Image (cartoon, rainbow, N blue to C red):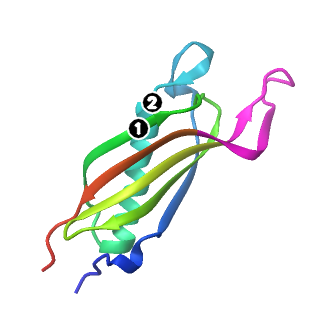
Amino acid sequence: MSPRATPEHVGTTVTHRRYVPYSHAHYAGNLVDGAYSLAAFGDVATELCIRTDGDEGLFASYSDVQFLAPVRAGDCIEIEARLERVGTRSREMSFAVRVVARGNPERGESAADAFAEPIVATTARGVVVVPPAG
C-alpha cells in the first residue's frame, strides 16, 4: 500500500538549492523572469508529494504569489515547500525562494558573496492534488 499524507505530515518541508544559469536571464541587469521561481516551486512540490503520498501529484493552482526581490542570473537560490494542509486529495503548500549567494562583479568577473541572511525573493501558496487512495 502506498503512503498517504495525514494531518501529522503538516509542517513537512522540502528544500532544494540551485545555481541560476545566465541562460535564464531575460532582462537588463541579468534579471530572471518570475516564471523561473514558479517552475522551481513545482519541483519542490513534486518531491514533497512523493515523500508524503508516494505520488508526484499535479499542481491545481497558485495563490498569493509575491515577487519581493529580484532573482538574477548567477544567484544561488534556495527553494522551500512546506505542507500546510492535507485534504482528501488536495495538499496546500507554502513556498519561498531565497537568494543565498549572488555574483559580485565589482570585486572581479567570477567573484560572488554568500549572504549571512538570505533575501526572500518570491513567496506563494499552492494546491497540489494526488490520485484517490486505492
Residue extending farthest to the top is 28
**Which quarter of the image is occupied by the C terminus?**
bottom left
- Location of residue 54 (image quadrant): bottom left
Magenta segment boundaries in residue numbering: 100-120
Q: In this rendered view, identify the residue nearer to me: 33 or 68.
A: 68
Is 109 covered by the magenta stretch?
Answer: yes
Structural crowding at the residue carrying mark 2, measured as other residues with C-alpha within 10 Å and reported as few (<14), some (14–19) or many (≥20): some
SS for callout 1: strand
| Residue beneath disc 2 | 34
Query: Horizontal and vertical percent for residue 15?
Result: 54, 58
Q: Residue at x 64, y 35 (%)?
A: 75
Is 108 covered by the magenta stretch?
Answer: yes
- Which of the marked residues, 1 or 2, is nearer the chain's N terminus? 2
Disc 1 + disc 2, Cβ < 8 Å = yes
Type of the residue with mark 2: Gly
64 to 2, vertically: above or below = above
Query: Horizontal and vertical percent for residue 28?
Result: 58, 12
Q: Residue at x 43, y 54 (%)?
A: 94
Q: Residue at x 34, y 50 (%)?
A: 126
Type of the residue with mark 1: Val
State the predominant SS element of the stretch in magenta: strand
| Residue beneath disc 1 | 65
- Location of residue 132 (image quadrant): bottom left
Q: Nearer the viewer, mark 1 or mark 2?
A: 1
Residue extending farthest to the bottom is 1
Q: CA distance from mark 1 to mark 2?
A: 10 Å
Structural crowding at the residue carrying mark 1, measured as other residues with C-alpha within 10 Å and reported as few (<14), some (14–19) or many (≥20): some
121 to 105, vertically: above or below = below
